[in-house]
Image (tube, rainbow, N blue to C red):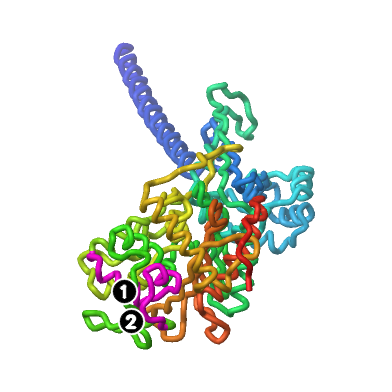
Amino acid sequence: MSRIILDETRRAQASRVSAWSRLLVLGMLAGLLLILVRVAQLKLRPDASLRAALTPPISTRAEPARRGDIVDARGRVLATSTLGYRLFIDPTQVQDIRTIAVDLAAAIGAAPDEIDRKILAGGAPRYVVIDDLLDDRQVAAVRTAGLRGVGLQPRQVRHYPQHERAARVVGMVGFEHTGLSGSEHAFDRMLAGRQGRLSYLRDVRHRTLWFEPDDYEPATDGREVRLTIDLVVQEIAERHLRRAVDEYEAGGGRVVVLDCISGAILALTDVLAEPAGPARLARNRCVTDPYEPGSTLKPFIWAVATELGRAHPAEIIPCPVDRPYRTPYGRSIRDSHYLGPVSWRNVLVQSLNTGMAIVAARMTHDEMRQAITRFGFGRRTRCGIPGETAGLVTPASRWSDYTQSSVSFGHEIAVTPVQMVRAFSAFARHGMLPTVHIVAGPGAGANVPRFRFVRQVCSASTADLVREILAEVMIEGTGRHAQSQRYRLFGKSGTAQLPRPDGGGYFEDRYVSSFIAGAPLHEPRVVVLCVIDDPDRSRGHWGGRVAGPVVRDVIDETLAYLAVIPDHPLPVD
C-alpha cells in the first residue's frame, strides 16, 4: 500500500516538474522574443535619449584648405580668401526649441521670427543654417552665449579687392567655393588645394577622447595663380573702351592688349551697353564670340600673296576708276573710294577691296585658305581662357570663287580678338607667331620665358615690309585719325557690315568697327585691338574713326607706363 502511495507521489511530482519546465521554457522563449523585439525597436525607432549613444564613436572632422590667390602680373591681388563662420543649429540638441530663436536673435542681432521661419523650413533635421556668414562681433557673441545645439562652421569667403576690374577674366566662385567662371573655373584644381581631415574617438556627448597621429591628415592649401594681366593696363583699356562705347552709343566693345614679345595678354576687356547679368559670370567675348574682321585681315592676305609671287609691291594693279570691279564670275566688288590703277603696295595702304580681289583671283583656293590658317585663324589659341572658340573659316569642301574674293577683304570669315592680336604680332616679330597666354605661372614669383614662339608664318623680310606699309597707313590711309604724337604706330582699320542673326546676309546700315595697331614701329612692344560692335551710324562707323582713337590712346598710356621712350613720330596735322 505504501509503495502505491509512493509511486503516485512520484508521478505527481514528475507531472509538476514537467509542467513547470514547460512554463519555464515558454517563459524563456517569450523573454527572448521580447528581447529581440526590443533590440529591433532600439535599432529602428530608438528613444531620443539613446540616439546619441547609437552613432559610431569615431568622428571625422574636415580641415578646409585655403583657396589660392589670383594675382596680376606684378603681384597685385585680384582674388583672395579669408576664414568666416556659418551659424547653424541642431534642433535635436537644442535645450528649448521654443526660446532658441530669441536667444540667437540677441546674439546676432536678427529678428526672432526670421530665425523661427528658418528653423521650421529647415530641410535637414539636424542641420539648419541660420546665417551663412557672421561678422567678428557676431561670432564672439555666439561663442559667449554658449547655447546648446548651436554651432559655428568654418567656411572660406572669397574677396575681390579690385571689384569689377578684370571681372570677366578673374571670374568667381560658387557656394562651395569652387570656380564657376573665368580664371576661377579654368584653374580651379590648382587653386582649390586638398582638404585635410581628423578622425578621433569621442563619447556620447561628442567630447574628444583620443586620436592617433596617423588619423590626422593636414590640409594642403591651393597654389597662387599669377595672371599676365596688368591692372594698370587693364584700367587704361577699360576706361578708353567705355568712353568710346558711350560716345558712339554702341552695342558693346572689346579691347585686347598683347605683349607681342612674350605673348602675354596685358589687358582683356569686354563692355556691353546693356549687360545681361553679373560681369563675373558672363562669357569673355574676346575669346568666345568671333567677328568679321573686314579690312584688318588684308595685311595677312597681302603678305602671303606677295611671298607666293602673285603680285609685286611695285606692280600696278588695274583697280577701277569710277565704278565697281566685276569679277570673272560676275560679282561686283565696291571700294569706299575709287583711285584707278595703283601699286600693289598702295592697295594695302588705301585698303582697296578691288585690288585685293584682283590679286586673290591669281591664287588657288588652297593657297588662299592656307594663307588664313597659317596665321592661326580657324584654330583656338589655347591661351588659358575658358570657353574659347576657333572662329569660323569656310571648309575646303565649300570654298568657292565667291569665298576667295570675300576672304581677301575680310568677309566670309570670323575671328576672335585674341586670334587677331596673335596673328598681327607676327608682323611685329619678323614673321614669328607668338604663343598667347593669360597665366604667367603658378606660385609667387613664377616666371615664363621671355620668348615663346610657335613657328615662322612668313619671312622676316615680308613681315618687316608689311609693318612699314602699315606705318604708311597711319599717315596716308585709314589710320590718319588714330595717329599718335608720341609713338610711331603701324596699324589697319576694319569696317564690316554686321551679319544678320538669322544668317540671311548683312544689315545695310549696321557695322562692326575695328582697329589694330602695334608700336613702337622699329622695336614693337605691344599690339592693341579694339572692336566696337554696332555703333550708331549717325555718330560714326568707320573703324579708323571709331576704334582707332581708342587703340592710339591705349598704346600711348601703356607704353608710357612701361617706360618705353617715344620714337620721334612724324608730325601730326
Res. 172 mark: none
Q: CA distance from mark 2 to mark 1?
A: 8 Å
Q: Quadrant of residue 29?
A: top left
The three-letter code of the residue at mark 1 reads Ala
Residue 71 higher or lower than 572, as above or below = above
Answer left or right for 550 relative to 378. right
User: Residue 394: percent from the left, percent from the top?
Assistant: 28, 67
Q: Is residue 364 magenta?
A: yes
**Residue at the image position 55 percent from the left and 77 percent from the top:** 250
**Residue at the image position 23 percent from the left and 73 percent from the top:** 401
Residue 437 higher or lower than 308, as above or below = above
User: Residue 92: percent from the left, percent from the top?
Assistant: 61, 47
Q: Are marks 2 and 1 in contact (CB under 8 Å)?
A: yes
**Residue at the image position 56 percent from the left and 75 percent from the top:** 546
Quadrant the N terminus occupies: top left
Q: Is residue 568 magenta?
A: no
Q: Which residue is mark 1?
A: 357
Q: How many marks?
A: 2
Nearest the eye: 274 or 172 = 274
Q: Which residues are magenta?
A: 338-365
Quadrant the C terminus occupies: bottom right
The three-letter code of the residue at mark 2 reads Ile
Nearest the eye: 4 or 340 = 340
Residue 315 higher or lower than 268, as above or below = below
Residue 105 at least partly seen? yes
Nearest the eye: 82 or 11 = 82
User: Residue 132: percent from the left, percent from the top?
Assistant: 64, 54
Residue 292 at least partly seen? no
Answer left or right for 11 relative to 76. left
Res. 333 mark: 2
